[in-house]
Image: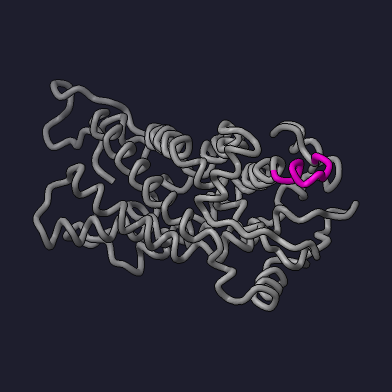
Amino acid sequence: MVFTQVVSIKDKAPGTKVYNYADSFWCTYIVSVVAASVAEILTYPLDLTKTRLQIQGEVASSSKPTQYRGMIKTAIGIVNEEGALKLWQGVTPALYRHVVYSGIRIVSYETMRDKLLLKNEDGSFPLWKSAISGVMSGVIAQYFASPADLIKVQIQMEGKRRLMGEPARVLSAAHAFKKIVSESGVRGLWKGSIPNVQRAALVNLGDLTTYDTAKQIIMHKTGLPDSHLLHCLSSICAGLVAATLGTPADVVKTRVMNQPTDKNGIGLIYKGSLDCLFKTIENEGFFALYKGFLPVWIRMAPWSLTFWMSFEQIRHMLGATGF
């Protein structure tokens, strides 16, 4: 992506390529954030349900017996015990996150694809280059967005803590931010950033790489035009692969971020992401790493579908080229 100036057709010199403002860096960034915000609001209850499922039965953090509930019972329980609006608890920091995360991941991927690693002469983008671009864009975007993710996870668990008779840890996004900084310093905002970045690398490998590659393959094999049907099929593939690759790292990320810390900001349950990984497998079995997979997948599919169709449609309306 490049910064461009709109030039009218009558003023351009013969042979000069005319760029649309909609293909500029900042327009792409803004469109990415808008599309992600729409997808986030529509699918957020599934994210909250997923987080609750990943924390329940966390043997390393409690000796209390756990009443296990599946996805549907967890969602119904939240509505009955806390109120329907609690299904959107923590959505504000989630939207803040996408202002950073979604904008950076899309423009980073397109920059690597179009300016650094480059497409082939026939316009195709090799899978290995797409994989590198997807992983790197996810790492960069998630590192900068990690503080918002930390705040979101802590707020998501507050309703459950209060029902269990435990004292509230945070009251709002602003309170959570101040509390983390006062207790652990600015560095504390990046608690859990390593598993968070690992998850983002895998999710973007599944989402960006799969979407871009599936779109190329489907267009080549079926002759479908760049249309809603193509976007829908590509996003379905992207959602499934992203959920499969990202769920284990998501479980580890959620548990590391949700654990209490001492006065120095050091976790009281897990020493780090690897320690959390090994304790989870040892105490609960390998498939505990896929706790919340169903809501992750069910959320990832409509999230991916909503995001990509919104993103592509807005770009089309503005006159930009397809992704």
Q: Residue at x 82, y 45 (%)?
A: 166
Q: In this image, 14 relative to 309: left or right?
A: left
Across and down, in percent, residue 200 comes to 52, 57
Reply above or below: 271 against 74: below
Quadrant of the image occupied by residue 218: bottom left
Q: Residue at x 33, y 46 (%)?
A: 305
Across and down, in percent, residue 283 comes to 70, 75
Reply above or below: 278 against 9: below
Instruction: Name the image colouring.
Output: one colour
Viewport quadrant of the N terminus: top left
Q: Nearer the viewer, residue 150 or 106?
A: 150
Q: In this image, 143 relative to 294: left or right?
A: right
Q: Residue at x 17, y 46 (%)?
A: 226
Across and down, in percent, residue 5 comes to 32, 28
Q: Residue at x 15, y 29 (%)?
A: 13
Residue 230 is inside the magenta segment: no
Q: In this image, 80 relative to 264: left or right?
A: left
Across and down, in percent, residue 35 comes to 39, 36
Q: Nearer the viewer, residue 290 or 261?
A: 290
Quadrant of the image occupied by residue 95: top right
Magenta segment boundaries in residue numbering:
160-168
User: Could one spot residue 287 in this view of the protein?
Assistant: yes
User: Could one spot residue 1 in this view of the protein?
Assistant: no
Q: Nearer the viewer, residue 144 or 176?
A: 176
Quadrant of the image occupied by residue 178: top right
